[in-house]
Image: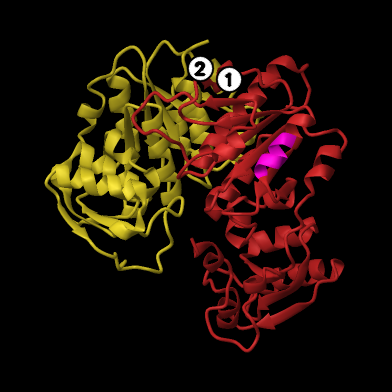
Amino acid sequence: MSVLHLRNPHSVLAAISTRPQDVLSVRANPQIGEPAWREVLAAAADAGIRVQSRAVQHRHSKQKSAGDGRQGAGEADVKPRSDVPLEELFASVTDHGLWLAFDHLQDPHNVGAIFRTAAFFGVRGIVMTKDRSAPLTATVYDIASGGIEFVPFSVLPNLSRALKVAKDAGLWVLGTSEHAEQDVAAVPRDRPWLLVLGNEQKGLRQLTTKNCDETCRLSPRGSITSLNVSVAAGILIATLTAEPA
Amino acid sequence: MTGLVAMVGQKRRRSRKPALMGSHQRCWLWGRHVVLETLRAGRWPIVELRIDRTLGSVIADEVAALAAEKHVPVIAETSARLAQLCGAGDHQGLIAKMRPYPFWDLGDLLASDPPPTSLVMLDRIQDPYNFGAVVRAAEVLGMDGVIIGERGQSDVNSLAARSSAGAVNVLPIARVPDLADAARLLRDTGLRVLATDSSADTPIDHCDLTHPTVFVIGNEHDGVSESVAAVCDARVKIPQSGQVESLNAAVAAGILCYELRRQRGRSESVGGKM
């Protein structure tokens, strides 16, 4: 299995706290004095992870920094988190809660930012497709800023099958479309939802839309397509997880 | 952090002339879509265009016509030369040498008619992608402008312009020497200035956002600086229900601005600004 080189101290901290056995080593320069990396070094030492206190020479120094410019003071080698079978992802379905499905999301920045948002709002699980989707690279982990460690996910060859399994498990499938009649705020909160997020350029595929139980939009109409996918997803997730008024 | 300047279109190779961004006088904008959009908008002055001489005639003619209309010279180059000039390979055959971005003066922004009732203030957003994405969200959600400081803040550069999907050509962006002074001025002008802070007690949906409002969004590393937060009217948070404690700046901006629109939509008459 490949190893990820993570550079955001928050993605490293989340991995240490949830699955320390998968964190192979941590390298950080203690002279930098970055508080988050000092925290990483302490947590790694507590967990018995190999720690090297030294200046970090990044292998791909030309690779642009992911996220917020905090990277550069340290690095960790971490095994990728394993996905879970779909049945397990939906095992905890009750009478409410939110799950997400990505319909060919291709930009790693969007995938990472949505994982971060999902973890912030307590989304219960994410379904992703294997092909034509951004894979979970180190960049995605770092942009997610720990989010990937807290939201279970399933990677599948076929989204249509996933939607069918979700429905069988008791989830309602919610699509987004600027032509939808109801605003996301009007979506009933008395049931568990699987929110399907479409591709950056094309939105939801027709086949996916056909499989949705309901569709919703943001107001003003049209903003759902003119907003960045991860920002639109943030508004949808915040609205769907808020306490009903 | 020195990466900010390095991420802009700085020349990679040595040249007899000084590096363009070294003086902060000019920079390169690249990518067909953002360059054409900026040219069309006519707000951010362009010194000259450089176009890949092998580009198809449809695009080349469009560029030539638009450039003539706007009195901007066009110089044909090889694709490799374009990459060398702007320092990026993904220029899509069209780059523009830019004059400094025309920031608004905050006083002018506040004096505009109708006066602004919804603003976003950014306290040191360093990443140009995040900066551009915030501007995009603010523009789409009908905010009246964005205010930034001079230190520790991403400039309006090619990456920010692209990430904003052209919104930097539409939405007023004011740059101020001191954010705390600006926050005081905004309060004195009658706007409510709200600092976002994950440890605040007040959730955003418990705030009345129908008053003229400014959201202050802080640096992802250390949030809104204390000197700015101290002069704000209140601290507010986006209520968290999961295990990650912070949101991406653009996502946070989107949620805040959407909540403001939602509240005002409810109180505005049908067919209003929404």
Where is mark 1, residue-wise?
A: A182
Q: Nearer the viewer, residue A161 or A21?
A: A21
In the visual, does B205 lie left or right of A138? right
| Location of residue B156 (image quadrant) | bottom right
Left or right side of A79 for B156: right
* Position of the N terminus of chain A by quadrant: bottom left
Q: Residue B266, located in which quarter of the rendered image? A: top right
Specify whether A140 is left or right of A216. left
Give the colour of chain B: red
Q: Is residue B115 above or below residue B108?
A: above
Looking at the picture, tell me which residue is in the foreground, B88 or B173. B173
Q: Which residue is mark 2?
A: A187
Q: Which span is picked out in magenta? A: B179-184
The amino acid pointed to by label 1 is Gln
| Chain to which the residue tagged by mark 2 belongs | A
Task: State the separation of the CA atoms marked 2 and 1.
Answer: 7 Å
Q: Which chain is yellow?
A: A
Q: Measured from the top left, where is residue A217 in percent x and y?
A: 57, 27
Q: Amino acid at mark 2?
A: Val
Q: Is residue B7 above or below residue A133?
A: below
Question: What secondary structure is the magenta-colored segment mainly?
Answer: helix
Residue B43's place in the image compared with B223, above or below, is below
Residue B20 image point, x, y percent:
65, 75
Mark 1 closeness class: few <14, some 14–19, many ≥20 residues within 10 Å? some
Q: Position of residue B209 (x, y in %)?
A: 67, 22
**2 and 1 marks in contact (CB < 8 Å):** yes
Q: Residue furthest bottom?
A: B16
